[in-house]
Amino acid sequence: MKTPVTFSLNGAEAAAFADPGQNLLDLLRRGLGDLSPKYGCGQGTCGTCTVLIDGAPHLSCLVLAETVQGRHVETTSGLAHGPDLHALQTAFIQGFAAQCGYCTPGMLMAAKALLDRNPSPTREEIIDAISGNLCRCTGYEPIVEAILAASRAPRHSGAI
Amino acid sequence: MPVEFRKDLFADERDDNLTEIGKPHIRQDILGHVTGRSPFYDDHLFDGLLHMRCVRSPHHHARVRSVDASSAERMPGVVRVIRPSDVPVNMNTLLALLDFGRDDEPLLTPDKVSYRGEPVLAVIATSERAARAAVAEVRVEWEELPFVLDVEEALAPGAPTVNQTYPNNTFDYHERYDHQKLRFGDVEAAFASADHIVEGEYQMSPIEQAPLETCGAIAAPETNDRIVCYTSTQALFFSVAVAAKQTGLASSRLHFIGGTVGGGFGGKVDSHHEPLAILGTLLTGRPVKYMWDRAEEMQVGAPRGGERWRLKDGVMHDGRIVARSLTGFFDAGAYTRLSSYAVQKATGHLPGPYTIANVASNVYCVYTNRTPSTAMRGFGITGVDFAIECHMDKVAETVGIDPIELRILNAYRDGDMKAHRRQAKNCALIESCQVVAGKSGWTLSQDAMAQSSLTGGGVGWRAEIPQTVTDQTGRIGERRRSGAPADPFAEAGQRASVPAGTANEHPATGNAPQRDDMVIEAERLGFKVATGGPAGAGPTSAGPAGASPGAPLPRVAEHEQDRPVSAPNAMPRASGGPSLPPGAAAPAERAPQPRHDPLPQRDPPAPASSPPTAAPAPPPPVQNAAPPQVPDGPRPPRRPGVSRFISGPRGRR
C-alpha cells in the first residue's frame, strides 16, 4: 500500500507515492525523475547517494522514503540557481575535480553541507566532511583543493 | 597541479611546443558531472521497466542436477524466466571477435558451474524486490565437485578439470603448447657462466576494479524493429558484436548507447549484461534492466587475475644481467575471456626495459575455479612489472650495487634488439631514473649520471638476434599427464637451435627492419603498392585499396615459404628511422636458412611468388608480382551475427 509523501525538493514542493520499504534514493530517481543522486552500493558505504535533509548530509539509499515527509531535501539538481552555478560546481570544473563523474553529486552535497555550516573550513575539516564519499578516479586531492577554492569564492559566481 | 616538462631531454627529436597538454583544460563532460546530468546508463527512465536478476552458483565447482523455477514463476511480479535453452547462441568467448580461442563460456550455464556466482537462470520481474524474492525461490540441485583455486595445483596431474573446452586447465597456444614460449639466446649456458644466480618468486592477488557505478545494461524495444541498449560498457563495439552473436540478431537491429561510464578501469569489457538485457526485451516486449548490485560487482565481476611469477637471473659481479628466465602463471579463473591475450602481452613485454642477451620464458593462462579474470589498467603487464622490479632490487642487494644504478646499467638503449625480436627505440628508462634520483635526493655515481638512452645501444651483440636454443616441452596435455615442471628448460631433454638472425617468421610481420612510426609498410604486410601516382609525388603506399579499384583484397600469405625473402635494404627508407646497423648481416645477404621445425607440415605449401627486385634505395621497387595466393584450406566457421571486421583468414593454424 503506497504512502503519499510531500516534501520540499530543492526549494519546490514535491509529492510522490512511496512503496512500502522504498528508499529515498529510489523515490527521487524513479518516483520524481531526479537522477542526480546515484546508486553505488545500496549499503551506505560509498556515499554516491548523498543528499541533504534539512541541511544535513544523509545516505539516501538507507533513508526510508516516507520519513522525509514535510522536510527539506536538497540534491545536486538544485545546486545551480538558474544559469548561475554554485561556487562548488565552478571550483570542481576549474580544478579538474571529476573524471568519471559518478561520485561527484555525492561529493558536492557533502561539501555543500560543510560550507553551509562552516564557511571557512580547514583542509582537515574538508577531508573529514567528505570521508564518507568514495572516489575511484581522482585520488581525492583535486576534490579537496576544489572545495577549498570554493570556500573562498562567492556562493554563486556563475561563470565556468 | 603543474606539469613539469623536461624538454632538455631528447630536445632535437621533435618539435613539441604543445598547445594542449600541460595546460589547464575544461573537460567536455564535467558540466554534466557537476550538475548531475551526465547520462550514465541507469539515468534513463522507461515506463513499464522490468528488472532482471540471476540465480547464481554458491559453489566453486558443481554440476547442475536440476533447476526448478516453477514456484518462482508463479510469484507476484514475475514476468519471465530465462533458461540456458532460451539463449540463441549460448557459448561464446570474448576474443571470438578476433577468431582467437574457442567458445568456452555460456551466458547462462546449463550443466556445470565453475565459479562461485556463475549464473544458471535469469528472472525478470516488475520490481527489483520481486526479482530478488523470485530468485530466492528457485530450487537448484547442485552436485558439488572438487575444485582448485591455485594455478600450480591446477596444472598438476589429477587436478579437476575446470573448463571443459580446455581440459588440461591451460589455454592451448598455437594448437601446440600449454603455454606461450619466448626464447632468445641460451639461458642455460649463460647461467653456467654467471657469477651470481638470483631467484625470486612473486605473487600478486586478484584485484577488483571496484568502479563506483556497477555494471549493467537497460534494453528496450524501439518502434522501428530495433532494440536500444544503454550500457555501462567501456567497449561499445565489443558489446554490440557479442550481443548480436548471442541473441542471433543482426547488428543493424541493435542501437547501442554508451560512453558515459562511472569508472571502468578494465572491468567493464566482458559484455555479459547487454545480451541478457536484450534477450529479456525480446522475450517480454518491454524495457529490461540488468544491473549488478555491489555484492555482485565485487564477487561476480571479473577482477584483474592474480599472477605468480618466478624469475631467475644470471648476473655478473659488475651487475650486468646476462640471462633472465621467467615463469608466469595468469589465473584466468573459470573462463578465458581476455586472459589468453594477457599472456601474450606479458610475453612481448619481457624481460622488461632491460637489454639482456639471453631470455627465456614460459607463461601460462591457467584455469582455476576462481571468478573469471579480465582486464585492468596496464592489462597483462602490470603484474610482471611488479615482479621484475622487485627482482631488480633483489639482484642489486645480492650483487651489492645501488638499485637505481643497476637499472641504468642494464637499461635498454635505442637500437638494442629486444627479446621478442624488435628493436628498442625512443627508450627513456635511463633518463627517468636519473631525474627521479635527482628529485628524491638520491645520489648516483658520475658514471650513472653520464649514461644516456641515445648512446651505447645497437652495437655488437646488443643489436643482434643471437642463435637461440629452443625446446618442444610442454605440448598440450603433456604436463597434465606427467607433472613435468613448468619453468623453461627445467627438464633435461631435447634442445633444438634456431640460427642467429632468425626473427619472428609470421608472414604478417615478416623479418624486415622497423621503420618510423606511422609509416605504412604495405608491401611487408602483403598489400599492393600503387604504381606511380600523382605527378611529382614521392613513393606512395596504398593501403588495402590497392592499385586498381575493384580489385579483390589481397590476402596475407599463410606460410613463411610463400613470403618473398625481403632484403631490408629493398624496403624504402623512411626519413632517418632506426635500422639495423650497417655491420649487421641483412637476411638477404645470407642464403635463406631452413626454418627449424621438426614437425611435419600440416598444410600443403602454396605456390611461391617471385621475390621482388632488390633495390638499394628509394624510390620503392614496383611490385609487379601478383600477391601471394592463399592455399585453399579449412577456414574457421563463420560466426552468425558477427560481422567480419578483418578481411582474410587469420589465427589458429
Image (cartoon, helix red, strand yellow):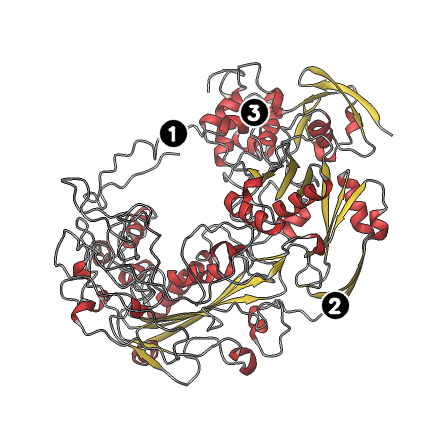
- As drawn, B214 above or below B498: above
- Label 1, secondary structure: give it: loop
The answer to whether residue A128 is visible is yes
Packing grade of label 3 (10 A; few <14, some 14-19, many >=20) is many
The answer to whether residue B319 is visible is no
Mark nearer the viewer, 3 or 2: 2
Q: Residue at x 46, y 17 (%)?
A: A159
- As drawn, B406 above or below A121: below
Residue located beneath label 3 in the image? B35
- Output the chain of dot 3: B
- Label 3, secondary structure: give it: helix
Residue located beneath label 1 in the image? B24
| Residue at mark 1 to residue at mark 3: CA–CA distance | 21 Å
Q: Residue at x 27, y 49 (%)?
A: B520
State whether discs 3 and 2 lie on one chain: yes
* Amino acid type, callout 2: Glu
- Output the chain of dot 1: B
Q: Earlier in the sequence, mark 1 or mark 3?
A: 1
- As drawn, B363 above or below A89: below
Location of residue B288 in the rendering, given as x and y in whole percent from the top left corner: 69, 39
Taking the image as shown, residue A114 lies to the left or right of residue B376, namely right
Residue located beneath label 2 in the image? B144
Q: Earlier in the sequence, mark 1 or mark 2?
A: 1
Location of residue B226 in the rendering, given as x and y in whole percent from the top left corner: 61, 37
* Amino acid type, callout 3: Thr
Quadrant location of the C terminus of chain B in the rendered image: bottom left
The quarter of the picture where residue A95 lies is top left
Q: Earlier in the sequence, mark 3 or mark 2?
A: 3
**Residue sitting farthest toward the bottom:** B493
Quadrant location of the N terminus of chain B in the rendered image: top left
